[in-house]
Amino acid sequence: MCTRGFLIKYPKNLPLERVLQLRCELYFEQFVECIVQVRHINREYLGARVIEINDHGRFLCERFLDERRAANLNE
C-alpha cells in the first residue's frame, strides 16, 4: 500500500483499466472502502490506483502508512 494505491495478491487475470470496488480491514473492524483501477498486472499481483475514497478511508490509510513509517524509523 502507498499513498496512491494498493498492490493486491490476485492470481486471476484482469484487464488493465478495470475499475473495482475494494474493501479491506486495516484495523480490527475498521474497513477502508474505495474504488480502484487496475494499472499493472503480473502472475500474482495487480497494482491498483485509488480513484475514489471517502474521508474516513483516507484517514485510515494515512494513519496506517504513518505507523509503518514510524516503525521502520525505529528499527
Image: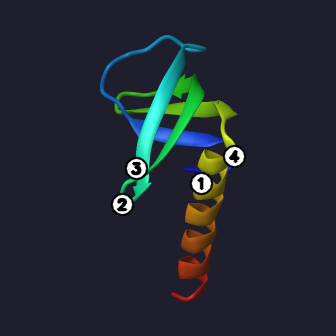
Q: Tell me the residue that label 1 is attached to.
A: 61
Of mark 4 and mark 3, the one earlier in the sequence is 3
Q: In this view, does 31 lie to the left or right of 73?
A: left
Question: Distance from label 3 to label 2 (Cα)?
Answer: 7 Å
Q: Which residue position is annotated with label 3? A: 25
Quadrant position of residue 64: bottom right
**Residue displayed at 65% across by 59% down:** 62
Instruction: Determine the CA span between mark 1 and mark 3.
Output: 10 Å
Q: Nearer the viewer, mark 4 or mark 1?
A: 4
Kind of residue at badge 1? Cys
Res 28 label: 2
Q: Give SS at disc 1.
A: helix
Of 3 and 15, which appears nearest the observer? 3
Farthest left residue in view:
11
**In which quadrant of the rendered view does residue 4 lie?**
top right
Q: Which residue corresponds to the image point at 63% horizontal and 32% vertical from the top-left?
A: 49
Type of amino acid at the residue the image marks with label 4: Asp
